[in-house]
């Protein structure tokens, strides 16, 4: 979930983060279920980023330089409580290395990057793109799912997409909280490993100017960053010692003030994304992570009860099991 309000890029912390951009996730395979990255999203303009901060790799991102947003971020949830740690940050990072030929491997605060604005803007979003707009910088890898330096590492614009403020702060925020609680109880506390991938489906819309010219803003370039039509998350709880405790499911929600949320299997998420991307090669989780397990049934029923407060019927649709395998319809 992004910041509670749109904030300028004020540097209150003078540190820097490190990342590696290239054609491989070899240094951050641990953030993928079965060490297998999502399939079918790569294009000529995408770059693979192992997000590194304080010499530790924290998560993985597939970034689209043309859309100036990530396609997805892959991460894990640790069984560590850090709810009292600050969740707001006033510093966001950019990635100089997204520009071909730049050998810099450090993700830096814009003001500390030593690069011109035009250079930074050529391959990615910058904080100015979000100023005086109706959009939040919405996290894909949620800062609330991470602790310590891992939380700081989520505040990179390569992990953010334009989100409707009501969707981001209220609806998706409540979903993240409920999901975090469920995974701790049903996965981490049972010695499982929680793998997640959160992504954004592009659209033809880009961030527009809000309400005409604002003083000091007349030379600004708008219409640069793609606004996602939908946000999705695939969840996998892997369990090495007891396959009956292994489960997966997925969310797909509209990126708007009054969104509709769909909750279904990882298999069904693949099908929906194939339609949206017009590609038959998409698969988010390897082997769909035991998508039809009884444990999935149990966890989804519990999620439904929690989420009805944030996505009230009929805006919420639970579609598990898939139609061909249903024995009864929930709700």
Image (spheres, rainbow, N blue to C red):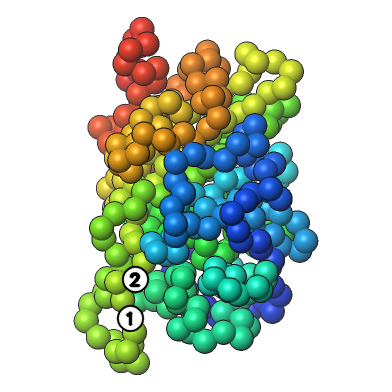
Between residue 63 and residue 173, name the one nearer to us: 63
User: Badge 1: how crowded within 10 Å, few (<14), some, or many (20+)?
Assistant: few
The image quarter containing residue 48 is: bottom right
Q: Is residue 213 shown left or right of residue 64?
A: left
Q: Is residue 15 above or below residue 27?
A: below
Find the residue positioned furthest to the right: 55
Q: Is residue 62 shown left or right of residue 214?
A: right
Q: Is residue 92 visible in the rendered structure shown here?
A: no
Find the residue positioned furthest to the top: 327
Q: Is residue 309 above or below residue 214?
A: above
Find the residue positioned furthest to the bottom: 216
> CB of mark 1 within 8 Å of CB of mark 2?
yes
Find the residue positioned furthest to the left: 212
Between residue 211 and residue 275, name the one nearer to us: 275
Between residue 53 and residue 103, name the one nearer to us: 103
At mark 2, the secondary structure is loop
Rendering coords of residue 142 (x, y %)? 55, 51
Residue at the image position 35 percent from the left and 39 percent from the top: 279
Residue holding disc 1: 221
Rendering coords of residue 270 (x, y %)? 40, 32
Residue at the image position 45 percent from the left and 64 percent from the top: 65
Q: Is residue 246 above or below residue 129?
A: above
At mark 1, the secondary structure is loop
CA gap between label 1 and label 2 equals: 7 Å
In the picture, the quarter occupied by the C terminus is top left
The image quarter containing residue 314 is: top left
Labelled disc at residue 224: 2
């Amino acid at each position: 979930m992004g910041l509670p309000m749109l904030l300028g890029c004020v540097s209150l912390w003078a540190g820097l983060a490190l990342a590696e951009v290239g054609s491989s996730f070899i240094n951050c395979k641990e953030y993928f279920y079965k060490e297998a990255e999502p399939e079918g999203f790569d294009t000529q303009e995408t770059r693979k980023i192992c997000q590194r901060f304080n010499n530790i790799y924290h998560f993985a991102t597939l970034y689209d330089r043309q859309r100036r947003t990530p396609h997805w971020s892959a991460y894990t949830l640790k069984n560590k409580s850090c709810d009292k740690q600050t969740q707001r940050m006033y510093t966001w990072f950019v990635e100089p290395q997204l520009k071909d030929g730049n050998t810099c491997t450090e993700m830096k605060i814009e003001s500390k990057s030593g690069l011109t604005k035009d250079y930074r803007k050529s391959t990615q979003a910058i904080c100015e793109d979000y100023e005086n707009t109706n959009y939040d910088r919405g996290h894909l890898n949620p800062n609330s799912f991470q602790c310590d330096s891992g939380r700081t590492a989520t505040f990179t614009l390569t992990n953010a997409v334009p989100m409707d403020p009501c969707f981001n702060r209220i609806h998706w925020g409540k979903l993240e909280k409920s999901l975090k609680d469920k995974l701790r109880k049903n996965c981490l506390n049972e010695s499982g490993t929680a793998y997640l991938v959160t992504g954004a489906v592009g659209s033809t819309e880009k961030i527009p100017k809000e309400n005409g010219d604002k003083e000091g803003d007349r030379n600004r370039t708008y219409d640069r960053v793609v606004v996602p039509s939908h946000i999705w998350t695939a969840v996998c709880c892997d369990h090495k010692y007891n396959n009956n405790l292994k489960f997966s499911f997925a969310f797909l929600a509209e990126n708007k003030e009054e969104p509709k949320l769909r909750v279904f299997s990882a298999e069904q998420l693949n099908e929906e994304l194939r339609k949206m991307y017009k590609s038959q090669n998409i698969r988010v989780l390897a082997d769909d992570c035991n998508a039809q397990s009884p444990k999935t049934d149990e966890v989804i029923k519990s999620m439904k009860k929690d989420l009805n407060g944030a996505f009230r019927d009929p805006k919420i649709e639970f579609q598990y099991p898939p139609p061909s395998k249903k024995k009864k319809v929930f709700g």
